[in-house]
Image: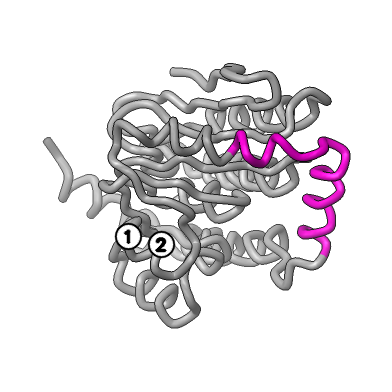
């Protein structure tokens, strides 16, 4: 289990998440993503970061077993997610998310805060939070789909395909699975060809005019996650989820 960084090209850093079997991350994993993205963006030689994942899918979100074992872990996990999401959004240089397979829960938080998204044909995106006794990341899903679609997806726990997101303009390209990293690197290379100082200024400027405060939005959502935990409904939903998926 790891988060690693490679440099396939001088001005491009690739951060790869690998937490088998489904990239459901414990608190440490989210902090590792944050550290890797921040380090890459803080390197003066890097002008673009590609965030990708190994394995069956981009991300299954948080490790529910960690929360189910220890109620206090909920605070730690939510803080870790917020740190990772912020690291992507606040990265000094543009971040391109390369998404394959499932992108759920916290994965949507990462991708929604990226600057550009390239996805494979099999990629799907969604927030199954209501089915798993949690709330959150609607702030980030709203950056990928229109408002009413976001609400429908959130209330139903349905997913949306990469092709559908491409139709909404939030996914740059949809490619065969085997071409995903090459397509992401192609876009990253085009971005990295720009002046590094100007790119950093542009990233700061675009964040400054963003109509949505992603930090405050997610923090507000987290408050309802804690409320669900205190009321006991979160535990009941997670217990039902584990029962439904018992192997």
Give the residue displayed 61% in from the left and 39% down from the top: 80
Question: Can residue 68 be spotted in the picture?
Answer: no
Cα gap from disc 2 to disc 1, whole angstroms? 5 Å
C-beta proximity under 8 Å, tags 2 and 1: yes
Foreground residue, 230 or 103?
Answer: 103
Question: Can residue 227 be spotted in the picture?
Answer: yes
Give the residue displayed 71% in from the left and 26% down from the top: 40
Q: Quadrant of the N terminus?
A: top left
Residue numbers of the magenta segment: 188-208
In this view, the residue farthest toward the bottom is 148
Disc 2 secondary structure class: helix
Q: Quadrant of residue 235?
A: bottom left
Indicate how the structure is coloured in the image: one colour
Q: Which residue is mark 2?
A: 166
Magenta span includes 203: yes
Q: Which residue is mark 1?
A: 163
Looking at the image, residue 186 sits to the left or right of residue 235; the answer is right
Give the residue displayed 73% in from the left and 33% down from the top: 47
Would you place residue 161 above or below residue 212 in this image?
above
Would you place residue 49 above or below residue 155 in this image?
above
Checking the image for residue 245, the label placed there is: none
Magenta span includes 247: no
* x then y, percent, for residue 68: 38, 41
Give the residue displayed 66% in from the left and 32% down from the top: 37
Looking at the image, residue 246 sits to the left or right of residue 105; the answer is left
In this view, the residue farthest toward the left is 247
Foreground residue, 95 or 221?
Answer: 95
Q: Quadrant of the C terminus?
A: top left
* x then y, percent, for residue 207: 77, 58
């Amino acid at each position: 289990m790891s988060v690693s960084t490679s440099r396939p090209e001088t001005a491009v850093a690739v951060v790869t998440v690998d937490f088998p079997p489904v990239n459901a991350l414990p608190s440490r994993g989210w902090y590792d993503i944050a550290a890797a993205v921040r380090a890459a963006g803080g390197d003066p030689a890097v002008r673009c970061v590609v965030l990708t994942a190994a394995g069956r899918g981009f991300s299954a979100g948080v490790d529910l077993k960690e929360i189910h074992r220890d109620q206090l872990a909920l605070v730690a996990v939510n803080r870790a997610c917020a740190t990772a999401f912020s690291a992507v959004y606040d990265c000094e240089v543009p971040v391109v998310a390369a998404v394959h397979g499932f992108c759920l829960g916290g994965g949507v938080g990462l991708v929604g805060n990226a600057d550009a998204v390239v996805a494979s044909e099999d990629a799907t995106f969604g927030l199954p939070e209501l089915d798993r006794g949690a709330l959150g990341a609607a702030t980030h899903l709203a950056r990928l789909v229109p408002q009413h679609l976001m609400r429908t997806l959130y209330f139903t726990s349905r997913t949306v395909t990469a092709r559908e997101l491409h139709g909404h303009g939030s996914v740059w390209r949809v490619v065969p699975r085997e071409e995903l990293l090459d397509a992401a690197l192609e876009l990253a290379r085009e971005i990295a060809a720009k002046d590094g100082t100007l790119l950093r200024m542009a990233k700061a400027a675009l964040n400054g005019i963003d109509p949505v405060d992603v930090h405050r939005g997610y923090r507000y959502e987290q408050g309802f996650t804690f409320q669900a935990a205190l009321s006991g409904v979160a535990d009941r939903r997670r217990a039902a989820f584990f029962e439904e998926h018992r192997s």
